[in-house]
Amino acid sequence: MGLCLYVGNRNYSSWSMRPGVLLRAFDIPFEEKLIRFDSFAPD
């Protein structure tokens, strides 16, 4: 898998979701990783 999309919490902003919608629309494979903003602990 070549592309990795780092997204934030979609409850606060839809900006992190928009690239994923575009990638899915064109059937481009990608991995999605959620970045939590409420903690400093690594995932």
Image (cartoon, grey):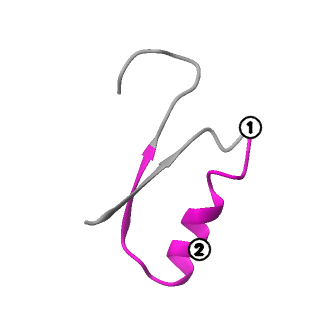
Q: Residue at x 58, y 64 (%)?
A: 19
Which badge, 2 or 1, is on the more N-terminal residue?
A: 1
Give how far across and how far down residue 21 sits, in percent.
Answer: 60, 69
Per the rendering, the mark at residue 31 is: none
Q: Secondary structure at mark 1?
A: loop
- 30 lies left or right of 12: left
At label 2, counting other C-alpha atoms closer than 10 Å, the crowd grade (few under 14, some 14-19, many 20 or more) is few
Q: Amino acid at mark 2?
A: Leu
Disc 2 to disc 1, how far (Cα)? 19 Å
At label 1, counting other C-alpha atoms closer than 10 Å, the crowd grade (few under 14, some 14-19, many 20 or more) is few
Give how far across and how far down residue 17 sits, in percent.
Answer: 62, 56
- 26 lies left or right of 21: left
Q: Secondary structure at mark 2?
A: helix
Q: Residue at x 58, y 25 (%)?
A: 37
Q: Residue at x 51, y 75 (%)?
A: 24
Tag 2 near tag 1, CB within 8 Å: no
Per the rendering, the mark at residue 12 is: 1
Residue 2 highlighted magenta (yes or no): no
Name the residue at the top extreme. 40
Q: Which residue is mark 2?
A: 22
Q: Residue at x 42, y 78 (%)?
A: 28
Q: Amino acid at mark 1?
A: Tyr
Provide the residue span drawn in magenta.
Answer: 13-33
